Amino acid sequence: MRQQGNLQHEYAGSNSQLLEGPVVKEELISLLGYLKLCMYFSKKPYKVFMEFGGYDESDVLIKKSKARLMKPSFTVVRDRSAKCFLLFIRGAISVKDRLTAATGAEVPFHHVVAQDGHVSRLVLGHAHCGMVVAARWIANQAIPCLNEAVAQFPDYGVKIIGHSMGAGIAAILAYILRENEKLSSSTCLAFGPAACMTWDLAESGKDFITTIVNRNDLVPSFGKVSAAKLRTEVMASSWVHDLREQIQQTRFLGFVNRSVSFIRSHVPFVSDPRSKVVDVDMLVPNSSEADQVKPSSNSDAVVKKRHAIACWSCVAAHKHSIDSAKHGTHDITNKTDVNVKAEKTDIETAQPVSISMEELDLQESDNDDDTDRGENEPALNETDEDQAVELLETLTDNPHKPSSSSSQSQDPPQLYPPGRIMHMVGLPSSSEPNSTSEQGEEVVALYETPRHLYSKIRLARSMIREHYMPKYIKTMELLIDKLVAEEEEDIDDDHRLGSL
């Protein structure tokens, strides 16, 4: 979240269309009324829902209050004021509802577009398995009743309304109902629908499905493919920095190791093990033979006199702490036996680990016996290092690039929200010209957004709570108030111009 920041501005880009004016205001007022009805049906007792909508028993066509697996709660009522039959589908509230939503395998789902009683087009695609099964079950329950109701009231339409999982089921149900000749004019209002169908299916529903998304709502972008993209992005952001530091540290240790190899090859007392005690005495010229320190009895004194050995011991210990976290505890060289062989082992133990190109992680060399290596052998494979850096940069620049070995046919299809998408976007007040709001306050605007924006998950702290219907209602009320204020300002400006 810290890396990407607030991404609401992406929904208000050049490919999005700003929606404003009196027509949009009236549409929002109508949408707000239907959303409140949907919330009362989902959250309140059925009697309270009927009182809020002004319905009586004669207006109820179907009532299925108890949800089961793949069988969500829904109702069909007659709305006299709107001259419409409203089919409300409840979202995922109970455990069985959530199991229906969790049945997220993609199944083939095709839509037959009929015109004048003939098949004009066939749209092929895939859709969410649990929602398809639930939509077909509701269709079997509701179609006979709706056919009779439409035959009795031919001037009435059919409108399917849902939120969250209920919105995804409502969208799929709209495709099914429109294949029925008597119900071919059915429409759908989807509030915060789940990503439930592939691109072609979603695009073909623009004429009869309206999707409303609130700010940072996560659900319309959440799917198997988008979740996999998010996983790759999060993994890259979490370990790529540490890997870069380890590669830089590997380069540094390789340089130091080559420098030590050069010194050992040119300085006699370092390369000749027989001059060990003499070298220590040379560092302490005033010591007598009786006071000479034996390496086997007091190794700490020797280490204090040999600063180079102490330095390399620290490097070796640091490397050992890294390797022990990844590969377990290894045996280390006996510190009391300070001789040339121990010095050589400590120095070569500090050599950098090699980089495995398959796992992009630092691995310990398979050859644990470093003494078998030549003294002049480079401690770092330059080719592997450059390849690791190049691949690291490629991953950071293109985190979503698929592997060439994976076939495209095996990848699950990307699912999108259906129909025409209207997104209520919260933007900083500074981005709105002539804004009178306080600094730091968000200004809400309504945009018709392209579908490709919902192929990835945008993280935000409010991405869960802004999915709930009360948040949708609050944002829509803010939008309506804003549009009403703009309309009044336009009327005042017209009056001023008329007076002039």
Image: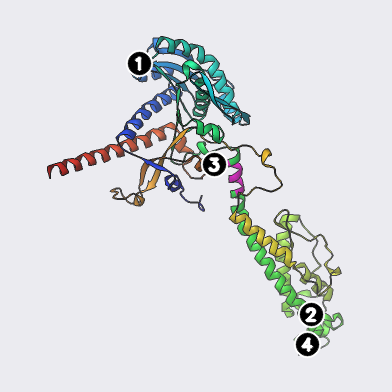
Where 220 sits versus 396, above or below?
above
Amino acid type for the residue under numbered disc 2: Arg
Give yes or no for residue 87 being in the magenta stretch.
no
Between disc 1 and disc 4, the foreground one is 1
Q: Position of residue 123 (x, y in %)?
A: 56, 29
* Residue bearing the label numbered 1: 80
**Residue closer to the observer: 149 or 363:** 149
Magenta-tinted stretch? 226-232
Quadrant in the picture for residue 314: bottom right
C-alpha distance separating marks 4 and 3? 72 Å
Left/right placement of residue 444 relative to residue 104 reads left
Of all residues shown, which one is farthest toward the left? 499
Q: Earlier in the sequence, mark 2 or mark 1?
A: 1
* Residue bearing the label numbered 3: 455
* Residue bearing the label numbered 4: 282
SS under mark 2: helix
Look at the image and tell me in which quarter the C terminus lies. Answer: top left
